[in-house]
Amino acid sequence: MILNFKVQDKRFPLLTGAGSDAVHKDPIYSYAVTELIDDSGHIGTGLAFTIGAGNELVCQAAAFYAEQLKGKDIEEIMANFGQVFNALSNEQQFRWLGPQKGVVHLALASVTNACYDLWAKKRGVPLWKLLIDLSAEELVNTLDLSYLEDELTKDQAIQLLQDNMRSRDTRMNIIEKGYTGYDTSVGWFNYSDDQIRENCKKAIDSGFTAMKLKVGSSDPLRDIRRAHIVREVAGDAATVMLDANQQWTYPQAVSICNELKEMNPYWVEEPTHPDDVYAHKKLAELVSPIKIAMGEHVPNKVLFKNYLQLGAAGFVQVDAVRVGGVSEFLTVSLLARKFNIPVVPHVGDMGQLHQHLVLFNHINMGHEALFLEHIPHLKSHFVHPVDIKNGVYKTPMEVGSSCDLL
């Protein structure tokens, strides 16, 4: 039974230039950390990600949600977590502050993620192991599919999982092999051209074959020059992604994406405003064969549904510390699987939690194991930091979701 909880405001200043992009010039990587404490001494830790100012508001809202879980057993909560999630996300007064977006939804992510961590710790297994061992029906019971019924009913979700689980034995070798990572820290926005060149060389020497550059400069020629630097250093065989962090207007995005085709980007990420689904649809058509990746700032399953329905996303970057936590992440992953669109998460958790989730996505959902973003800047702050060797995430074997902070 959950006896108590603690919510903490954790902020981690970064080295000069690290984490910078076209919009967020001086981020402070921060977590609203929820700890759920049960009567057996287990502590479930959940994170929601912000970049500094306002993190305290997320913490205050997380305390409101966590209070609702006191006195309940984690197995009881998780047996029907979809209903719990629905009730919390639709709480009448907090819903007015969303609904299902912004501060209140980030707060729910922190509490939701603490529930999944506590559940795995109570069962004595890593989160990925807990998830792949659930039956299709048990897994779907942890999801809230409301507002998705036009595309994915409960019965359809169970059937989709069951269909993919039949062939999961062919994908279990990912546990031993590990999950490929990509280096997203080679080209932060405030880094000089020389830094980018050097970082690309270091990434290649570390075994990475995929990397990402921040774009969205006021001078498009700067973006084009830097993109060609990465391509030149990494070589034609490397996978290079570009991330505009929503900086461009739609006309700017059309123009610059067509200019960038020459260096053959694997995707262009968040090219314009994340709420403008129709602009992404038009953009995807006009800049083909470049594909559009999005999801870092898409707050909930309904907007993801709209992106998928319109064919506006080539890659889904749902982030479990930005949407409503693991439950909504898995919901969006199932929806993307129905549309046969790859899920390549944004990792506000620095990959700690998502290394578990992508294993489940691949093994039980049948998603292609492409790669998982790697951001190293907070590694020293975790009890069990991600283990990457030769550009590959090694499978975590400690119990829980790897989110405990020092």
Image: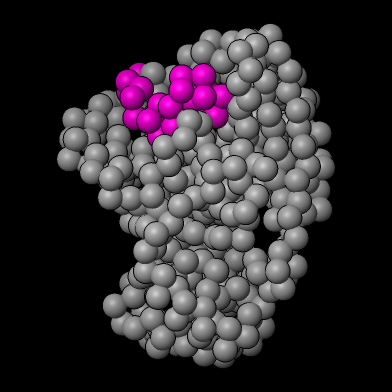
Q: Main secondary structure of the magenta part?
A: helix
Magenta residues, start to end: 116-137
Magenta-colored stretch includes residue 406: no
328 sits to left or right of 24: left
Residue 366: % across, % down:
27, 41
Residue drawn at the location 54% of the way across and 63% of the way down: 270
Residue 281: % across, % down:
45, 60
Q: Is residue 110 above or below residue 299?
A: above
36 sits to left or right of 353: right
The quarter of the rendered structure image containing the N terminus is top right
The quarter of the rendered structure image containing the C terminus is top right
Residue drawn at the location 73% of the way across and 55% of the way down: 12
Nearer-the-camera pick, 260 or 403: 403
Give the image quarter of residue 13. bottom right
Residue 307: % across, % down:
46, 50
Nearer-the-camera pick, 117 or 262: 117
Magenta-colored stretch includes residue 127: yes
Give the image quarter of residue 240. bottom left
Res. 379 in view: yes
Q: Is residue 131 above or below residue 56?
A: above
Residue drawn at the location 82% of the way across and 42% of the way down: 56
